Every structure is written in structure tokens, then in C-alpha cells.
Amino acid sequence: MEKVKAVFLDRDGVLNKEIGDYVCSFNDFVILDNFEALKSIVDKGYILLVATNQGGIAKSWYTISELEKMHRYLIDTYKNNGIKITDIFYCPHHPDFTGECDCRKPKPGLLLQGIQKYNIDPNLSYFIGDRERDIEAGNAAGLNGILINSNQPLIEIIHLIK
């Protein structure tokens, strides 16, 4: 089976507006206008996957149901703009509440799940994130990391994806 190229994306600050702390409510979930950039990435033959820490679940700041509502809205909004998000991987843990896990970035567990599930070639794939922990996780999974500023338009870094 042929290996797949993918671009993994962090969520908060990359796909939706970073508000300084956890996005705990659907009402605070604002999708950034990165439609042109993501369409360009898909047109280059990449699938799009999301990998996001969601420690607010462990802290009981929001529910999995509220998180799924945000993710459904994200997928539908991009779909309505001609962009397919293939899957979303999230870590519901927080070390202070649930102990250590293998999926919370900077550990690469979420990325490794996606790599295995979709037969992804890490050498041909990327992880775009707005925190050093994203890049650290990407590097540990063998991906090419791209660090952006929170809420930075992705069109500004699209040239880095070959």
C-alpha cells in the first residue's frame, strides 16, 4: 500500500482563535479564515489531520460532548468551504489530574495514532503548531515541524509545504 502525505494541525491558535486559555465553550470557538491555505495544502496531495491537547476535559472545565460539538462545527465549516479534515485526534488528559499519558503533546502519541491509522509517511508530512511542544511532538514522530505564531494566517507559511 502506498504511503500517504499528511499535514497535522494543532487546533487552538492554528485552526480556531487562541483566546489565552482553554476554549471551554462552543460560543468561544471561532474558526480562523485559513480556507485558501488549507485548500492549497489539500491540492498538493496532503490529507489534513488535527492533533490537539484538551486537558480541560480532565479538569472538568468542559465535557466531551461540548468538545465534539466544536469539532463537528470545525469539520462542517471546512467541508462547506471545500476542505476535508480527515480526522481529529485529541488528548483528554492532564498530568495534574490524570497522571502521565503517551498522547499529550509534547509526547508524539496523537501523531503516531494518525500515522498508523492512515499509513502516513512521516518524512513527507508536516505538523503545524503554535507552541514548541507541537514541534517537539512532531519531531519525535518523524514529521517536519512548522512553528507559527498563535492565530497567524497559514497562507504566510504555505510555501514551506512542498
Image (cartoon, rainbow, N blue to C red):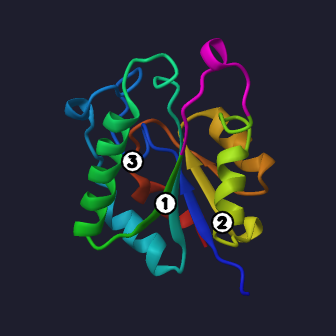
Q: Element under label 3?
A: loop
Give the image location of residue 9, x and y in percent.
52, 52
Q: Earlier in the sequence, mark 3 or mark 1?
A: 3
Q: Is residue 128 left or right of residue 100?
A: left
Residue 128 vs 84, above or below: the answer is: above
Which amino acid type corresponds to the residue marked 1 in the rendered image?
A: Asp
Instruction: Assess whether mark 1 and mark 2 are in contact (beta carbons under 8 angstroms).
Output: yes
Q: Which residue is mark 2?
A: 117
Q: Element under label 2?
A: helix
Give the image location of residue 160, x and y in percent.
59, 63
Instruction: Return the mark for residue 87.
Output: 1
Q: Quadrant of residue 104?
A: top right
Residue extending furthest toward the top: 96
For label 2, the crowd category at 10 Å Cα-Cα, with few meaning under 14, some 14 to 19 and many 20 or more, is few
Q: Quadrant of residue 30?
A: top left
Q: Residue at x 38, y 32 (%)?
A: 18
Residue 118 vs 76, above or below: the answer is: below
Residue depth check, mark 3 versus mark 2: number of the one nearer the observer: 2
Q: Is residue 81 left or right of residue 144?
A: left
Q: Residue at x 39, y 48 (%)?
A: 15
Residue depth check, mark 3 versus mark 1: number of the one nearer the observer: 1
Instruction: Return the mark for residue 15.
Output: 3
Q: Residue at x 68, y 55 (%)?
A: 113
Tell me the magenta residue range.
90-101
